[in-house]
């Protein structure tokens, strides 16, 4: 393989050099990271092969706990994907200039997460051909169909949002990066679709961007609302609540914002983008996370206060399992470590510095995943109809190694997708605000 010398590249500005540098050079650390993620995915593929060959019996899911860790992952990935609309729609349309360096990061995470969400739901079906039965035996009465429709729509819009924002920079890669492999040159030439930064092109792109930014907002709210309906339309304690829709949406925004902060820190450190992702960005994101956490805290109080005040029937039993039973450690970590403590800490400016807020965001993201686990599993183990005369395995749910392997593989796939997209495209827009009106760049089609 020909070694690429970054010094042979001809960059017009220092900004171009800073933002395109990682597209040219490939470090040993990057290769080892990719190798690790691929190895994890290979183990997950073997576990999935066993699941397809022997059936869902290799999992711990049974008639009562029919949704396991896969659905927890699905809801988590959908939650993380919501961050794309938070930045691409709400902050962009409000012209929050400070958030512009973070928009593409959010869009990359959104596209990667929604792809993983779609894949994990197919894995949960047992065999991949069952997904086609959902399509061929289309029933609009089924909440599963609602989810299929809204996830497909959100995936398309998220992809278009990412492509629209990245198109001018693909043209820059096409024209500036001469010392790269031929396959990469062809890739940039095809995906740039003859972009030349002509004023008419820029005007049309801006219009489409605004339209898509508006369109993604109701779809983003709908995707998590419809996901909550999958639970709310199922007769289980803890799910029989009209609060689930806004509860899911608010939790998704908080988890997504924490994921952005986590990604910001890694990207800033590894790609040496300290001049573009500044401490001010971390400070503002910390303030935003405080606001989103307060909203989520309000819906948490709504979700638990009513049933906990009464503590009657099967719902009382389920809450006892959460508060003081086998799920108590996980539940209180979610509430304290993933919500209350981060909320308190982020009120202090010193905790909104890059490294402290990185650790806080990690705690929020972990809490968000455990929260999705608690939403799914305890409710399924407490049915309104008494569980009688069944095998002992029906009464408990402990994920098998196959489930854990596929779960870890799904997270590795998410990180792999994000890593590849960051390696292929500039993670921060090359054209800064003051250079938006630069001269036309003729496409290099040689």
Image (cartoon, rainbow, N blue to C red):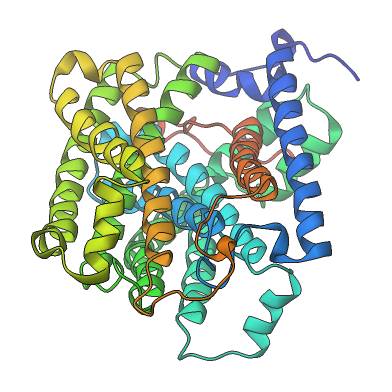
Q: Please tell me whether residue 183 is drawn above or below residue 252 in the rendered image.
A: above
Q: Is residue 299 left or right of residue 147?
A: left
Please, which residue is most extreme toward the left here?
Answer: 309
Q: Position of residue 121 (x, y in %)?
A: 59, 64
Q: Position of residue 207 (x, y in %)?
A: 39, 60
Please, which residue is most extreme toward the right here?
Answer: 1
Q: Position of residue 170 (x, y in %)?
A: 62, 40
Q: Please tell me whether residue 273 is drawn above or below residue 408 in the rendered image.
A: above
Q: How many marks?
A: 0
Residue at horizontal 80 percent and vertical 42 percent from the top? 186
Task: Return the residue nearer the eye: 401 or 220.
Answer: 401
User: Toward which corner of the image does residue 39 lie, by quadrant?
Assistant: top right
Residue at horizontal 45 percent and vertical 33 percent from the top? 438
Screen quadrant of the C terminus: top right
Residue at horizontal 41 percent and vertical 29 percent from the top? 262
Residue at horizontal 20 percent and vertical 49 percent from the top? 296
Q: Please tell me whether residue 48 is drawn above or below residue 239 in the rendered image.
A: above
User: Toward which corner of the image does residue 173 lie, by quadrant?
Assistant: top right
Q: Is residue 236 left or right of residue 72?
A: left
Q: Is residue 164 visible?
A: no
Q: Position of residue 396 (x, y in %)?
A: 51, 57
Task: Return the residue nearer the eye: 332 or 94.
Answer: 332
Q: Is residue 423 left or right of residue 276?
A: right
Please, which residue is most extreme toward the front here?
Answer: 389
Task: Return the residue nearer the eye: 314 or 181.
Answer: 314
Q: Is residue 216 visible?
A: yes
Screen quadrant of the N terminus: top right
């Amino acid at each position: 393989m020909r070694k690429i010398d970054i010094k042979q590249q001809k960059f017009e500005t220092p900004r171009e050099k800073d933002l395109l540098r990682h597209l040219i050079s490939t470090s040993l650390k990057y290769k080892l990271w990719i190798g690790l993620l691929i190895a994890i995915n290979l183990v997950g593929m073997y576990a999935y092969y066993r699941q397809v060959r022997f059936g869902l019996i290799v999992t711990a899911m049974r008639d009562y706990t029919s949704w396991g860790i896969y659905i927890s992952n699905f809801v988590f990935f959908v939650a993380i994907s919501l961050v794309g609309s938070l930045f691409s729609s709400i902050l962009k349309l409000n012209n929050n200039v400070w958030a512009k360096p973070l928009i593409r990061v959010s869009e990359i995470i959104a596209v990667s997460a929604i792809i993983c969400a779609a894949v994990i739901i197919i894995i949960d079906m047992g065999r991949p051909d069952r997904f086609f039965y959902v399509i061929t035996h289309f029933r609009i009465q089924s909440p599963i169909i609602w989810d299929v429709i809204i996830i497909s729509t959100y995936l398309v819009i998220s992809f278009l949002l990412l492509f629209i924002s990245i198109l001018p920079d693909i043209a820059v890669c096409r024209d500036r990066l001469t010392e790269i492999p031929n396959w990469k040159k062809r890739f940039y030439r095809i995906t740039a679709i003859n972009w030349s930064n002509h004023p008419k092109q820029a005007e049309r792109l801006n219009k489409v961007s605004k339209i898509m930014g508006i369109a993604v907002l109701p779809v983003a709210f709908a995707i998590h609302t419809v996901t909550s309906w999958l639970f709310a339309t199922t007769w289980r304690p803890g799910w029989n609540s009209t609060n689930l829709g806004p509860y899911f949406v608010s939790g998704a925004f908080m988890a997504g914002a924490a994921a952005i902060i986590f990604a910001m820190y890694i990207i800033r450190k590894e790609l040496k983008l300290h001049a573009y992702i500044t401490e001010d960005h971390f400070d503002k994101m910390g303030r935003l996370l405080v606001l989103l956490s307060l909203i989520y805290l309000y819906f948490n109080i709504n979700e638990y206060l009513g049933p906990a005040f009464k503590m009657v029937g099967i719902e009382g039993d389920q809450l006892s399992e959460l508060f003081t039973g086998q799920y108590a450690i996980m539940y209180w970590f979610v509430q304290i470590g993933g919500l209350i403590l981060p909320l308190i800490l982020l009120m202090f400016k010193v905790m909104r510095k890059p490294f402290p807020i990185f650790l806080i965001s990690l705690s929020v993201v972990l809490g968000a995943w455990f929260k999705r686990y608690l939403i799914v599993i305890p409710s399924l183990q407490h049915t309104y109809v008494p569980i009688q005369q069944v095998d002992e395995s029906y009464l408990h749910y402990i994920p098998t190694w196959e489930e854990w392997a596929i779960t870890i593989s799904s997270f590795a796939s998410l990180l792999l997708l994000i890593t590849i997209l960051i390696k292929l495209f500039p993670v921060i827009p090359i054209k800064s605000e003051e250079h938006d009106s630069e001269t036309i760049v003729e496409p290099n089609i040689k």
